[in-house]
Each structure stands twice: as structure tokens, then as C-alpha cells.
Amino acid sequence: MKISRKFKSFNLTNCSTSIQRAVKTLFNNPYDLSIQDYGHLLQFSANRRFLRLGQQIHARFIVRKFAVDNFIGSKFITFYSRNDRLWNARKVFDEIPQRNTWSYNAMLIAYSSHSEEIETLTLFSSFLRDSDVFMKPDNFSLTCVLKALSSLFFDVDLGKEIHCYGLRNGFDSDLFVVNGLITYYSRCDELGLARKVFDLMRKRDIVSWNSMIGGYSHGGCYDECLKLFKLMLELDDGKVRPDGVTIANVLQSCAQKKDLVRGVEVHQYVMENNIEGDSLVCNSILGLYAKCGKLDYARELFEQMIKKDEVTYGCLISGYLAYGHVDNAMNLFREMENPSLSTWNGLISGIAQNNLHELTFDLIKEMQASGFRPNSVTIATLLSSLSNFPDLGGGKQVHAYAIRNNYDSNIYVTTGLIDVYGKSSFLLGARLVFDQSRHRSVVIWTAIIAGYLSHEDPNQAIKLFEDMLEYGTQPDPVTLTVVLTACAELGDTRHAQKILEKMHDKYGIQPVTEHYACVVRVLVRDGKFTEAEEFISKLRSETIPNELENENADDGDLEIRI
């Protein structure tokens, strides 16, 4: 069997002595190759992505009738994985008679590096079943599993089980395992646990810092993100310094807070420390100024950028739409050659939020004519626009499309359908959608409660609120506004005051003007004008808008002066 000339003519000057010796043996005395030589040759082929050469070596290995043990099997698995031949890698793995941790890890890493999360977890389950005192998952195994879990499941109990396994087996100080735990806990919205793991680390690398800072940023804890970034700068020892990922996460927090002052400071830090201005960093800077309303400067940065991608255009388009500059957004969108579905959705959503519903419908038709099919994001936006019109037929058509394309279980689509059906006086349909929903978030509960309230059934609205609490779902400020409005319709003072008392301590919600206004309306509707006056007098020390002075004047002659 002839080995490719490409291998023979390759410059081996910079290769290790063992590689050079193995290659020399391959050409001069191929039958003298040892298992170790085959391992070196396969590693060399894997690193250089020499698929044909590695296959020829594999063929020679088979001809020699060598047994596939864990050492050489792992080399074959790595070689085929590097060349995107997972099927061949798995075939080799299955041929290993007595697998050990080494071979299991080789296959786990192969699946993990190709984002085959289900296969990774399935193989890990087999690994656990085959484990004994001498063969069990190690730090490399846990790293692969945590990566797979972070992409699929956000169940904190799974993370805790892996965490405990790591503690029992001494992997709690392994940098890769701990970084994986921080990422997974953050994805599960368990930022407190993530921070505890982070604080207990004796040594941190840039991935550690980015995992925690990114967790705060993506989890909506923007103040904590900025505080941790400040701590990172204060502890700067010259070894770990912010990179582009760090900057992108911090700028996202500044943009979401609309903290332009802090954002400008971060921008200045980037310039002074020569942080590489790749597309991630440049888009984050552009997004900051667009989000904070500095649209002229954002446009200036946009024009200066040499490389513009979908995100670049999307940042500026979103900024224009957020501040009502629809024409500028449309003109910029028209400059794009081949906008993706996500860019179409961003534009359509922004147009809908500007209450240009007819244009929203026209853009969806144009998007379809361009070859794109509406996805769950498109459908949710379409339903939001339809809810402004009593269009039951349109709602049913969208519902049918969602069912055919398996989008009907999406929480935003479900919420939109309940809203459209409720506003189209089809409460039976709204309730059917609600009853069929498997994951009832607070948004879905609020939608059905509001639907019954809009149909003058406040008793059922309050009953659903009680069902929601029994279901274990905590209300948000919007839910409580709807329920307090239902109490006002009934003049149910006792229930309204009970909700107000629990709002802060039990639900963790600070009452705002809308909540106080509903309570005043309840008292007025119940004819308790004196109590209403006393209630507002009690709030005089706080900032209360003037609309509370004459709350629900139609319900009586009460005139309240603050």
C-alpha cells in the first residue's frame, strides 16, 4: 500500500523527534511500526487535517491485524473527529473491547466539539452505567457534559448533581469544570450560585471572568455586571485583562441601563488599551450609542466601520425604530443586500412597536415574497398587530399556521393568540389555547386574566389569579395591575388591600402609581370616600401624580386634594 506523496514531501523540520522517527519508519520499514508510532502518525494527521493520509494509516493498521486498544482507539477517534467524520469515530469507539476513561473522553470530546449535545449526554449516561472503581468520569468528562447541558437543559438540579460529583472526586479546583459550572448556573438563572462558585475559585482565567460577567449581563443584573467589571480592573495583575467578550457583555449592560456615561468610559478603555476592535466589540459600541439615543454619532461610527455584518445593521435599525425614526430605519434596511430572517423580524417588530400595523402586515408579505417563512418571532409580532383590530378570522389563520409549523407551544405565540381571541370576543378560543399550553408563564396567565376582565367577568379574573398562585407562578407588576382593576370593578376593597399588603413582602414588587390608582378606584367604587381620602393622605409624603386627585370622578362627587 502506497502512502501519499504529500505526506512524504511534507516538511517535518518543526515536528517532534517521535513524529520524525515514526515517518522515517513508515517509509523505510513500515512493518516495524509500533503502536506508539501509529499513535504519533495519527496525531500528526489529525493536527494537519490530513484525512486521506490518516485513512491510509488506518488501513495499514487493519492489514497488520493490530487490536484496537484504548490508546490507539482514542487516537483514531480524535483523528476522525478533527476531519468531521463522527460516524467513523464512533465506529472505532464501538470496536474497543474494554473501554476506559481515556477512550470515553475522546468520544465525548468529539461529540462536544461538534455540538452534538444529545449524543454527548447519551454517551455520558452509558459511561456512568459502565463506571467502576478504576473507570469513571473525570474533569474532561464533566466539562463536556456541562457544555452540552448549557445548550439544552436549564435544570439547576442537574447542575448541582454534577457539582456534587466534582466535589466528591476532587474536581472542584479544575478550572474548566468550574468555568462550566458558572456558565450552567447562569443559564439556569441561578446567578447567586454562579457567583458563589466564582468567589471560591483560587485561580481565575479570562473565561472565568467572562462567564460570570456574561451571566450577569444576559441575566438582567446589569449593576452587578458593572460592579464585577470594576473589580476585575481593580485586581488587574497583568495576567488576566478584559478582552472583546468582556467588553461586549459590559457594553450590553450599559446599553440596557441606558447608562451612557459608563458606556463612554468603557469605550475609552477600549481605545486606550488597544483592545482588538473586531466585529463583536464594534457592534457593541455602536449598539450602546444607538440604544442611548445618540443616533447621529452611532451613524458616524457605522459609516466608519470597514466590515459591516447583519448585527451592525440591526443595531442601528433598532436604534432608529426605538426613537421613532422609521424612515431612517427603512432606508438603512433597503441598503442591505440579503437581510436574514432575524433582521426582517427585528425590523417588523420595531415597526409594530411604532403602531404602524398596516406597514407591519405589508413587510411580512414582502418577507415571504423574498423566500422566508415566518417563524415564532414573526408570528408573535403579527399577533401583536392583529390584537389592535377585531379580526377573528385573521387570528384563526395565524393560529392554524402556528399549529402546522409547531409554533403554537411558544409562550409568545400562545400569549398573542389569547390576546387576539380575547379582544375579538372569542373567549372560548382564548381559554382553549390557555388550557392547552404546557408551560404557563406569568405572561400567559396575565393574558387570560386580562381576557376575562375585558369581557366584564372580574370574578373569573380573580379566580384565575388565585389559580395562578396555587400553580406556583409569581405575579409581575402587570398581573397585579390587572387583578386590582378587577377588584375595582367589583368594589372588592378587602381583596385589593390584601394584594397591596402582600405586594412588596411576598411578591417582591414595589407598588407604583397604577397600583395605588386601582386601590383608590376600589375604595371609590365601594363608596368608601373617607377611606379613599385617608389612603391618599397617607401617601402625601411620597410622589403621587395628580391623576390620583380626581380618581374616578364618574363614580361620585369625591374631590381629593393633595
Image (cartoon, rainbow, N blue to C red):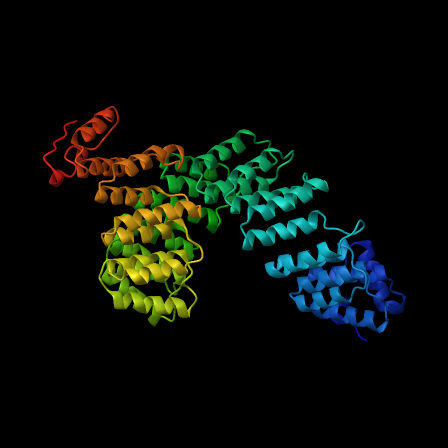
Question: Is 179 in front, or is 430?
Answer: 430
Asked if one can make out residue 11 in the rendered structure from this viewpoint, the answer is no
- Residue 287 position, x and y percent, is 39, 47
> Quadrant location of the C terminus?
top left
Q: Nearer the viewer, residue 122 or 475?
A: 475
| Left or right, residue 360 beside residue 38 | left
In this rendering, the count of numbered labels is 0
Judge whether residue 182 can be spotted in this image. yes
Q: Position of residue 320 (x, y in %)?
A: 30, 51
State the residue at coordinates (31%, 51%).
449
* Observer-nearest of 486 and 394: 486
* 287, above or below 110, in the image: above
| Residue 127 quadrant | bottom right
**Residue at image x 23%, y 31%?**
544
Residue at the outermost bottom position: 1
Give the side of residue 183 with respect to residue 95, left or right: left
Q: Residue at x 78, y 69 (%)?
A: 58
Residue 211 located left or right of residue 488: right
Q: For residue 182, which quarter of the picture?
A: top right
As drawn, which residue projects farthest toward the left?
Answer: 557
Picture quarter with the N terminus: bottom right
Q: Position of residue 259 (x, y in %)?
A: 37, 37
- From the top left corner, tell me how far across and down residue 130 is, in percent: 75, 57
Query: Which one is in front, 530 or 536?
Result: 530
